[in-house]
Image: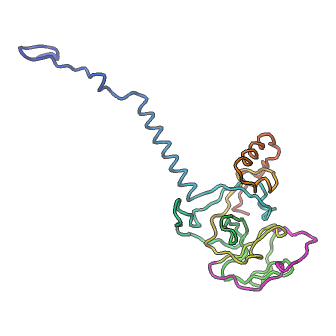
Amino acid sequence: MLSATSTVSGVYPVCTTVPRAFSAAPKWLPRRRFLVKTCLRVAIALLFTFSFVIEAGVVPTASMEGTVLVGDHLLLLKLPYGPHIPFTSARLPQLRSPKAGEIVAFASPVEPSEIYLKRVVAVAGDVIAIRGGVLYVNSVRLRENYARVGPNRRWTWQENIGPYRVPAGSLFVLGDNRDNSEDSRYWGPIPVQNVVGEPLMVVWSYDAPSSAWLDTSWLHQVRLYASALGHVTQTRWRRTGLLLCLK
């Protein structure tokens, strides 16, 4: 037998040592590849989640006061309501239609770029009437324990409407804070296709006036959120995790 380094007339030694240039990859390279793949997967998952499943939003006005407060930061469930496909005008199929009593987020019929939050009080086919601020659906007075109405309110024509039937493919929506809400009393039923989601829960709530949330300039928003660090008592801690889908 010949060893790997034996020589016989004209036979050169066989080298069994792998040159450094062809040695195994550095130990850190697999870790970097794993990190890159993990980051890509997380990015794709987040993009899918926030494009099609949920969306974060803040409530800037008091139209749902009593149930939803100014400064509530919400998670909206979008998937069942046909979310928009990013970078296109197309939408996924709508899987369900809201039911009476549910709170929904929808594109305003007056300003489509604005998203409103209201409660569905009647659906297609229901006959609705309001008499002296009292809501009737299908001739039955609706018990609205969630509604807030001032004791000395002056009744206007918006508090005396109907009866009329909600058209097909439409919803009649009202704000829980009836004294401070623009809703179907003013612009009629909204198309179901305007619905973009329903609120799931409050993730954070900060006590600041509507004017603070309505100013959407990035510099103002940075200052607003930075101020929360120095005013922790203005955070409504008890509202964190409040499930609105049960309200």
The outermost residue toward the right is 152
Q: Quadrant of residue 165?
A: bottom right
Q: Is residue 53 visible?
A: yes
Colouring:
rainbow
* Boundaries of the magenta span: 146-169
The outermost residue toward the left is 9
In percent of the image, x 17 and y 17: which residue is there? 4
Q: Is residue 146 visible?
A: no
Rendered location of residue 64, percent (x, y): 78, 64
In percent of the image, x 80 and y 42: which residue is there? 232
In percent of the image, x 83 and y 44: which residue is there? 233
Rendered location of residue 160, percent (x, y): 83, 82
Asked if residue 158 lies in the magenta stretch, the reply is: yes
Q: Quadrant of residue 14?
A: top left
* Left or right: 231 as drawn, with respect to 154: left
**Quick one: quadrant of the C terminus?**
bottom right
Rendered location of residue 188, percent (x, y): 72, 78
**Quick one: quadrant of the N terminus?**
top left
Nearest to the observer: residue 211 or residue 55: 211
